[in-house]
Image: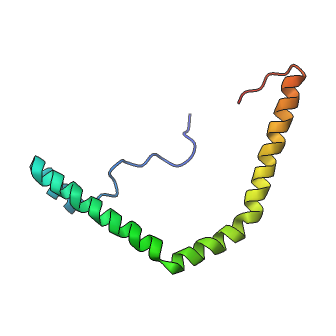
Amino acid sequence: MATRGRPKKQEFEDVPSEFKDQANSSSREELQNLISLVSCNQVELMKLKSEDSDLATAKEVAKQAGAVYAEGSKLNKAKILYCKTLLDDKGGHTKS
């Protein structure tokens, strides 16, 4: 039987091999320092992201462009739930 959807990605596939080599050869203390360094980098990255006005503008444009689809999807979900409720009231059995 064929699998559906996208093949599962390897957990650490995106981690650069240089970083893996450095981490693999590190002591416990060096690994803790490496974790701290990467965590600080992540905080800085998130700060820069929150201050990026171009990104904020692009997100707003995308949100507005997708509003019709989001509303349509929300309405379709409500219609399905309504029909399932009616089906249950009429003695039908549905899977959630």
**Which residue occupies the extreme top position in the image?**
91
49 or 23: nearer the viewer? 49
Identify the residue at image location x=47%, y=77%: 52
Identify the residue at image location x=33%, y=63%: 42
Quarter placement of the N terminus = top right
Quadrant of residue 41 in the image? bottom left
Estimate the x, y position of residue 73 in percent, counting from the top left: 75, 53
As drawn, is 89 to the left or to the right of 55?
right
Residue 80 visible, this orientation: yes
Estimate the x, y position of residue 22 in percent, counting from the top left: 15, 58
Identify the residue at image location x=22%, y=62%: 37
Quadrant of residue 30 in the image? bottom left
Identify the residue at image location x=75%, y=60%: 69
20 or 46: nearer the viewer? 46
11 or 54: nearer the viewer? 54
Query: In the image, is residue 91 above or below residue 26?
Result: above
Quarter placement of the C terminus = top right
As drawn, is 60 to the left or to the right of 39?
right
Residue 16 visible, this orientation: no
Query: In the image, is residue 47 above or below residue 38?
Result: below
Estimate the x, y position of residue 72 in percent, counting from the top left: 79, 56
**Which residue occupies the extreme bottom position in the image?**
54
